[in-house]
Image (cartoon, rainbow, N blue to C red):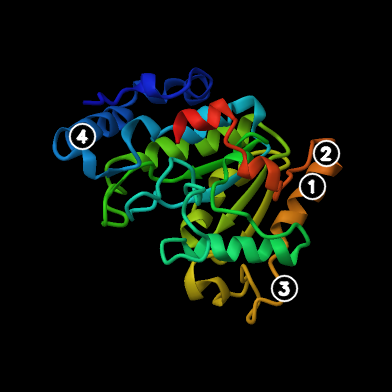
């Protein structure tokens, strides 16, 4: 059985978190996760050794852009430990394929990048995109079920420390939950903050900053704006739809976590 501890967090991210890992808030999270893992660990998504996968695949020094999700997918076989990402084996036209990814793919196509070949976003993480959920675990079939275990304290400290330490980052805040982290990010210097409705379901259209305009004729332009910002700051842009890399099965680092 997996024994949850701070050693699960990559060393560079532990350094970023500083004295948080000595706090009562961390001890509460650690205790709550260990207790949850004692009973029916097979019902926890993703598998516990993938809780910190986003941090493992995107080291602190390589982060260019952060996309904040809420909690992992709670449907069987979807959660990977990366916000919005699912296994490439899930057919894009299947019922299991999340509406959020369909709309992300539509936005990318509208911005001229092309559609995603599948829902596996590992290729983004390799380019410095941190795909971070604000709760890193969930119980199978129960959305938001681990939101009160103490993840908020950890993720809030991580977001705050990253914004303060790393100038020129891009933040994509889709939906009210992600946007609740705005004060933490605004404390940093030279951060590009892009906000819109969440890309899932019909809510994609229903705010004054829609992710997609009604009729899906135009998008919020976030992917284009992010690359323009990176260009302007001398940072390599993100190749959002590189079909060769997103279909590749040869990457040993990605395969390690599949």
Q: Residue at horizontal 31%, vertical 49%?
A: 147
* Residue depicted at 50% across the width and 31% down the height: 255
Q: Earlier in the sequence, mark 1 or mark 4?
A: 4
Circles 1 and 3: CB distance less than 8 Å?
no
| Residue 178 position in % (x across, y down) | 50, 54
Work out whether 199 lies above or below 172.
below
Rendered location of residue 94, percent (x, y): 46, 65
| Secondary element at tag 3 | loop
**Residue indicated by mark 2:** 233
Structural distance between the alpha carbons of marks 2 and 4: 44 Å
Foreground: 168 or 212?
A: 212
- Residue under the point 25% across and 24% down: 3
Q: Residue furthest left?
A: 39
Q: Which residue is mark 3?
A: 218
Outermost residue to the bottom = 215
Please rate how many residues cluster around mark 2, counting C-alpha atoms within 10 Å: few if below 14, some from 14 to 19, many from 20: few
Q: Under tag 1, what secondary structure?
A: helix
Q: Do residues under tags 2 and 1 come within 8 Å of each other at their CB atoms? A: yes
Q: CA distance from mark 3 to mark 2?
A: 26 Å
Judged by depth in the image, the label closer to the viewer, 2 or 4, is 4
Which residue is the site of mark 1?
229
Quadrant in which the N terminus appears: top left
The first of marks 1 and 3 along the sequence is: 3
Residue bearing mark 4:
37
From the viewer's perspective, is the residue at label 3 or at label 2 nearer?
3
Q: Earlier in the sequence, mark 2 or mark 4?
A: 4
């Amino acid at each position: 059985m997996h024994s949850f501890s701070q050693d699960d967090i990559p060393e560079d991210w532990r350094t970023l978190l500083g004295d948080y890992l000595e706090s009562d808030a961390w001890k509460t999270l650690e205790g709550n996760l260990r207790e949850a893992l004692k009973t029916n660990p097979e019902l926890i998504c993703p598998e516990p050794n993938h809780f910190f996968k986003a941090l493992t695949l995107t080291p602190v020094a390589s982060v260019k852009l952060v996309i904040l999700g809420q909690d992992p997918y709670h449907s069987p076989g979807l959660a990977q430990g990366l916000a919005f990402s699912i296994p490439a084996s899930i057919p894009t036209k299947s019922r299991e394929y999340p509406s959020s990814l369909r709309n992300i793919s539509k936005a990318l196509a509208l911005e001229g990048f092309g559609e995603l070949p599948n829902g596996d976003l590992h290729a983004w993480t390799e380019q410095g995109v941190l795909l971070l959920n604000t709760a890193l675990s969930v119980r199978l079939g129960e959305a938001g079920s681990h939101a009160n275990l103490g993840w908020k304290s950890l993720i809030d400290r991580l977001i705050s420390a990253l914004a303060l330490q790393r100038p020129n980052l891009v933040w994509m805040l889709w939906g009210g939950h992600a946007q609740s982290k705005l004060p933490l990010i605004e404390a940093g210097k030279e951060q590009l903050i892009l906000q819109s409705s969440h890309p899932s379901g019909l809510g994609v259209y229903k705010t004054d900053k829609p992710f997609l305009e009604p009729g899906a004729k135009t998008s919020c332009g976030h992917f284009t704006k992010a690359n323009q910002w990176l260009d302007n700051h001398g940072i390599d842009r993100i190749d959002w739809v590189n079909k060769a890399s997103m279909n590749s099965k040869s990457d040993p680092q990605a395969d390690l976590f599949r």
